[in-house]
Image (tube, rainbow, N blue to C red):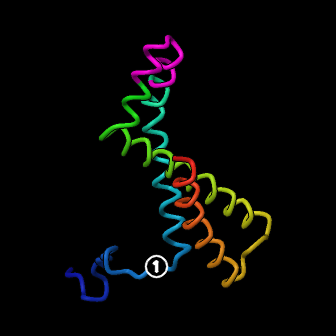
């Protein structure tokens, strides 16, 4: 028995799909959750070292102020803020706030912009 053209598996190219802004916020919410889960051991290590002694604090401060450490600090801070704000947005949906198309689009843009602005302010 041969498969007809209609029954063949459908190839979905995710790079060619045009998602609404709410879709990007939702995907970024999931991705930042994974990133934060992966970053927990590193954050706990940095916290432990920084609290152990003044030298440890100085070492962690030096790491997060230069090069790759600074980039990692920026990414984790942005991920935390985006995940927090998108989570609050999704909780609002759960209780019925902002479900209309226009308000959902506005809240998605608000999450995207606010996460970047708060990251810049907190650096």
Residue 63 is left or right of residue 47, and the answer is left
Residue 82 is left or right of residue 95, and the answer is left
Please name whichever residue, 64 or 90, is drawn nearer the observer in this view of the structure: 64
Which residue is located at x 52 percent, y 60 percent? 116
Count of residue discs: 1
What range of the chain is rendered magenta? Answer: 46-59
* Location of residue 51 (image quadrant): top right
Please name whichever residue, 29 or 110, is drawn nearer the observer in this view of the structure: 110
Q: Secondary structure at mark 1?
A: loop
Q: Which residue is mark 1?
A: 19
Please name whichever residue, 76 or 28, is drawn nearer the observer in this view of the structure: 76
* Location of residue 31 (image quadrant): bottom left
Which residue is located at x 49 percent, y 43 percent? 36
Compared with 81, 21 (above or below) is below
The picture places residue 47, in percent across and down from the top left corner, at: 51, 24
The picture places residue 46, in percent across and down from the top left corner, at: 45, 25
Q: Is residue 41 magenta?
A: no
Quadrant into which the N terminus falls? bottom left
Residue farthest along the top direction in this orientation: 53
Which residue is located at x 53 percent, y 53 percent? 119
Compared with 105, 44 (above or below) is above
Which residue is located at x 62 percent, y 79 percent? 105
Magenta highlight: main SS: helix
Q: Badge 1: few (under 14), some or many (20 or more) residues near its Cα, within 10 Å?
A: few
The picture places residue 91, in percent across and down from the top left corner, at: 72, 59
Residue 54 is left or right of residue 105, and the answer is left
Residue 93 is left or right of residue 14, and the answer is right
């Amino acid at each position: 028995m041969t498969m007809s053209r209609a029954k063949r598996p459908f190839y979905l190219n995710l790079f060619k799909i045009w998602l609404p802004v709410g879709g990007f916020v939702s995907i970024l919410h999931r991705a930042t959750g994974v990133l934060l889960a992966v970053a927990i051991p590193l954050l706990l290590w940095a916290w432990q070292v920084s609290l152990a002694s003044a030298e440890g604090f100085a070492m962690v401060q030096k790491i997060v102020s230069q090069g790759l450490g600074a980039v990692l600090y920026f990414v984790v801070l942005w991920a935390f803020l985006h995940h927090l704000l998108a989570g609050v947005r999704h909780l609002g949906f759960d209780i019925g706030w902002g479900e209309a198309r226009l308000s959902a689009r506005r809240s998605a843009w608000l999450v995207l912009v606010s996460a970047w602005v708060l990251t810049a302010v907190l650096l």
